[in-house]
């Protein structure tokens, strides 16, 4: 989700202030899985959700199939306690009320008999209620109950921050993906429910429509509700890998002309990602986009789009492109813990300068990088090396890196690319995403990874030990600083890191019209510099480093914000 440099929609919905509070457990997605949750294999989720826009409520019927790697006497799921449970059964046998409890959003179900490895169990949970309403989606998660300009219901879920447990019983952790999800979304006719994966039909009875969708390995917060009076654009993309990818866009009918323009961007974006990274991961399902009343979200194969068809001087829809990047960095590759969220957002954000370079050349590439560079805060390391929940990462007040996972992550990748070269860089990214160097449709499945995984892959791809690079950029907050001192006819240069760790980063120096590359093997270098000579450090902007001008700019921006407050 693109949380930075985006104006809020201001969707403050009536009644939000009076809704029941979420528990700390529910509001903080990604709590460390219990040993019992880690033992589970989540084979299948069959979700039936009846969405009633008039009462802003839902009725849920979820049948979940699990296996296990170790003997288990209970199943632990996550479900907002503000959604009352009507009944629970295990393998068709109803449970008594004393066999389950859900005091704080962790739903614990005692099994009638122990679940042993090699067996499967079906847990059915029926529930109802008014799902948590987002005050400012997608930054504040929940449901959005809106109306189209002509007054018809327009509903969406956006739950990245708070998690899947806001509307269905799940394992609210990045590694809690089910293998397959069936969605049966029931809505008042003639509304449309656009869902994840492949459409398996629609039935209508008694004034209600039920839309059936099936998705493979959907990310937990990527399972989405999208309901509205949609019209649909459809087409096909003939991939460079030989497969044909369905293209779908659901839009509000009064936006038909704008929707056609947006739809026309799909093939070019696909070609960029497939030529740069590799095959679209869900080509046998679809590339899907749905117009939503909130800004946007990377819902797997059904990306939420609420950018109002904005035009930029870069000549593309930057929100659409960013959210689409998450099909590779977020849905195909999923961070194993929120602490590694920069793998989603840093890589996703770097795809925007790269797309500019692909479309228009170097000017736009560096302009996009400069825009990102100006917002880097360096308040906390990108990676702590410890378990984190979602808000522990996104919230600066909790000591997280916040927006740096986007912008600093992107500039770190730019620096790494310059250091190891295009061939090694893109081979490393490809292996990270697909788990292999030769991805083809059908020879890979979604996977999990961590920052140490990426470091190891970069070492293999480049043939170099770059622990010093990642130590400086990932595990320290402050950026490396280049100290330059001019003595008579010599320019002395020294790299300085916050923890005094090694930083042998090669450095280009332009002296007059000549560029000299200093190896800086021990973090030091010097160059002859006549008294009247001019020089430029890092003239081609290869290296992310501390520069005071950005800090001065940020202080100035902060002053303007304070002055603007009433």
Image (tube, rainbow, N blue to C red):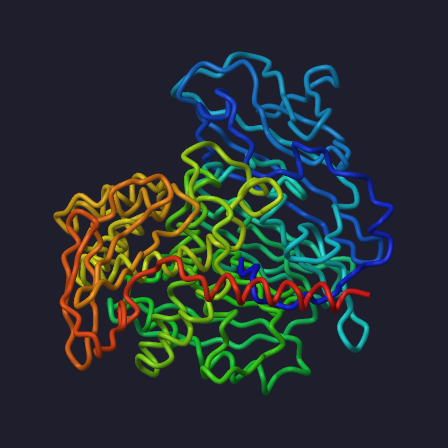
Q: State the residue in front, 186 or 78.
A: 78
Please report the residue visible at 38 percent of the width from the left and 76 percent of the height from the top.
267
Q: Which residue is drawn at 19% across and 45% down?
A: 459
Q: Position of residue 113 (x, y in %)?
A: 55, 12
Residue 354 found in image quarter: bottom left
Residue 353: horizontal and vertical position, in percent?
38, 71
* Quarter containing the C terminus: bottom right
Using the image, determine if residue 211 lies above or below residue 173.
below
Q: Is residue 362 left or right of residue 300?
A: left
* Along the viewing direction, whichever of 514 and 109 lies nearer the viewer: 514
Question: How many marks do you count on the picture?
Answer: 0
Give residue 326's quadrant in the image: bottom left
At 29% across and 60% down in the image, what residue appears?
484
Q: Residue furthest front?
A: 488
Where is residue 243 shown, x and y percent of the image?
29, 67
Residue occupying the point 74% across, 69% down = 564
Residue 336 in the image: above or below residue 52: above
Residue 287: % across, % down:
44, 66
Q: Tell me: 191 left or right of 234.
A: right
Q: Is 472 on the left-hand or right-hand side of 54?
A: left
Drawn side of residue 363 relative to residue 337, left or right? left
Residue 440 figure quarter: bottom left
């Amino acid at each position: 989700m693109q949380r930075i440099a985006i104006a809020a929609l201001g969707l403050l919905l009536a009644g939000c202030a009076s809704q029941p509070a979420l528990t700390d457990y529910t509001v903080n997605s990604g709590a460390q899985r219990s040993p019992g949750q880690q033992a589970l294999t989540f084979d299948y989720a069959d979700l039936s959700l009846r969405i009633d826009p008039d009462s802003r409520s839902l009725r849920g019927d979820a049948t979940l199939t699990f296996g296990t790697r170790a003997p288990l006497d209970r199943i632990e799921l996550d479900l907002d306690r503000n959604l009352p449970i009507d009944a629970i059964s295990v393998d068709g046998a109803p449970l008594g009320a004393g066999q389950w409890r859900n005091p704080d959003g962790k739903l614990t179900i005692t099994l009638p008999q122990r679940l042993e490895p090699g067996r499967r169990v079906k847990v059915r949970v029926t529930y109802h209620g008014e799902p948590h309403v987002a005050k400012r989606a997608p930054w504040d998660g929940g449901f959005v109950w809106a109306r189209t300009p002509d007054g018809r219901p327009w509903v969406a879920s956006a739950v990245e921050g708070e998690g899947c447990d806001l509307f269905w019983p799940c394992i609210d952790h990045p590694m809690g993906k089910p293998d397959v999800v069936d969605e049966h979304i029931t809505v008042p006719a003639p509304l449309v429910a656009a869902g994840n994966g492949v459409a398996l039909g629609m039935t209508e009875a008694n004034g209600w429509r039920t839309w059936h969708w099936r998705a493979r390995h959907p990310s937990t917060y990527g399972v989405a509700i999208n309901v509205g009076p949609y019209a649909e654009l459809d087409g096909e993309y003939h991939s460079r890998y030989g497969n044909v990818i369905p293209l779908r866009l659901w839009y509000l009918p009064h936006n038909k002309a704008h929707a056609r323009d947006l739809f026309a961007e799909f093939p070019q974006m696909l070609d960029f990602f497939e030529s740069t990274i590799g095959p679209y991961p869900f080509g046998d399902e679809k590339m899907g986009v749905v117009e939503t009343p909130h800004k946007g979200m990377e819902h797997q194969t059904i990306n939420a789009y609420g950018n109002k068809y904005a035009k930029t001087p870069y000549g593309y829809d930057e929100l659409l492109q960013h959210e689409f990047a998450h099909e590779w960095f977020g849905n195909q590759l999923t961070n194993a813990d929120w602490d590694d969220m920069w793998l989603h957002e840093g890589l996703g954000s770097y795809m925007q300068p790269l797309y500019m370079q692909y479309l228009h050349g170097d000017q736009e590439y560096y302009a996009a990088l400069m825009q990102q560079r100006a917002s880097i805060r360096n308040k906390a390391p990108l990676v702590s090396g410890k378990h984190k929940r979602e808000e522990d990462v996104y919230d600066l007040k909790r000591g997280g890196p916040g927006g740096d996972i986007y912008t600093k992550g992107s500039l770190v990748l730019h620096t790494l690319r310059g250091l190891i070269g295009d061939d090694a860089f893109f081979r490393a990214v490809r292996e990270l995403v697909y788990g292999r160097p030769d991805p083809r449709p059908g020879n890979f499945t979604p996977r999990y990874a961590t920052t140490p995984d990426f470091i190891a892959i970069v070492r293999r791809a480049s043939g170099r030990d770059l622990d010093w690079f990642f130590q400086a950029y990932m595990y320290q907050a402050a950026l490396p600083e280049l100290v330059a001192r001019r003595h008579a006819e010599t320019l002395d240069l020294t790299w300085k890191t916050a923890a005094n760790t090694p930083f042998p980063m090669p450095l280009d120096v332009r002296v007059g019209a000549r560029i000299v590359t200093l190896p800086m093997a021990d973090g030091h270098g010097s160059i002859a510099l006549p008294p009247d000579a001019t020089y430029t450090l890092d003239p081609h902007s290869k290296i992310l480093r501390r520069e005071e001008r950005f800090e001065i700019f940020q202080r100035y921006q902060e002053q303007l914000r304070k002055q603007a407050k009433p």
